[in-house]
Image (cartoon, rainbow, N blue to C red):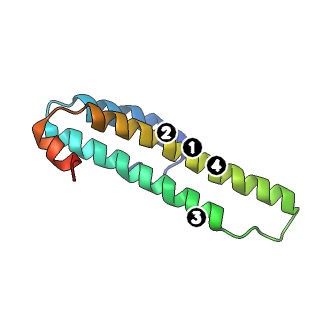
Amino acid sequence: YLLGRSDSVINSGLELLAGTARSSEYWWVRLVALQALDSLQTMYAERATELKAKPISNSGSKNNDSSGKSQTAESAHMQHEKIKQLFDSIKNAEKDKNLLRYYSN
């Protein structure tokens, strides 16, 4: 559900996903929550790369376009890094043997 939503919607869902990935009673529910975080992480990484590579439009001032582009690319990069840190901290704290099998791959 969160893929493709606004940053504010995604940010509000991160806490729910992180809480589920950390403390669900069922290991497979924790796995699915962490996979959702991984999908968000990938989405933001791809978005940042895409925005950095996108040519600057010739309409309007080049300085304004360039500034807006880099702010958006930087925002996507910051979201990626935030989710990556969350993902890594959850993964590194996991003790369940079923999940550790998945995480070691």
Do residues under tags 1 and 3 come within 8 Å of each other at their CB atoms? no
Q: Which amino acid does label 3 sit on?
A: Glu
First-in-chain label (2 vs 3): 3
Distance from Cα at disc 2 to Cα at disc 4:
12 Å
Q: Which mark is residue 74?
A: 4
- Type of amino acid under label 4: Glu
Q: Which residue is drawn at 46% across and 35% down?
A: 12
Q: How far apart are marks 4 and 3 (CA)?
A: 12 Å
Q: Which residue is drawn at 36% across and 40% down?
A: 87
Give the labeled residue for mark 1: 78
Determine crowd level at label 3: few under 14, some 14-19, many 20+ residues with C-alpha closer than 10 A. few
Residue 65 is left or right of residue 81, and the answer is right
- Left or right, 9 with reference to 30: right
Label 1 and label 3: CA atoms lie apart by 15 Å
Q: Which mark is residue 101?
A: none
Q: In this view, does 67 lie above or below 89?
A: below
Do tag 2 and tag 1 residues touch (Cβ < 8 Å)? Answer: yes
**Local crowd at mark 4 within 10 Å, few (<14), some, or many (≥20)?**
some
Which residue lies under the disc numbered 2? 82
Q: Earlier in the sequence, mark 1 or mark 3?
A: 3
User: Residue 2: image x %, image y %?
Assistant: 41, 48
Local secondary structure at mark 2: helix
Residue drawn at (57%, 61%) of the image: 49
**Residue linked to disc 3:** 50
Expressed as whole percent of the image width and height from the top left, the position of residue 56 reads 75, 67
Q: Is residue 53 above or below residue 83?
A: below
- The residues bearing labels 4 and 1 have C-alpha atoms spaced at a distance of 6 Å
Of marks 2 and 4, which one's residue comes earlier in the chain?
A: 4
Which SS class for mark 1? helix
Question: Tag 4, which secondary structure?
Answer: helix
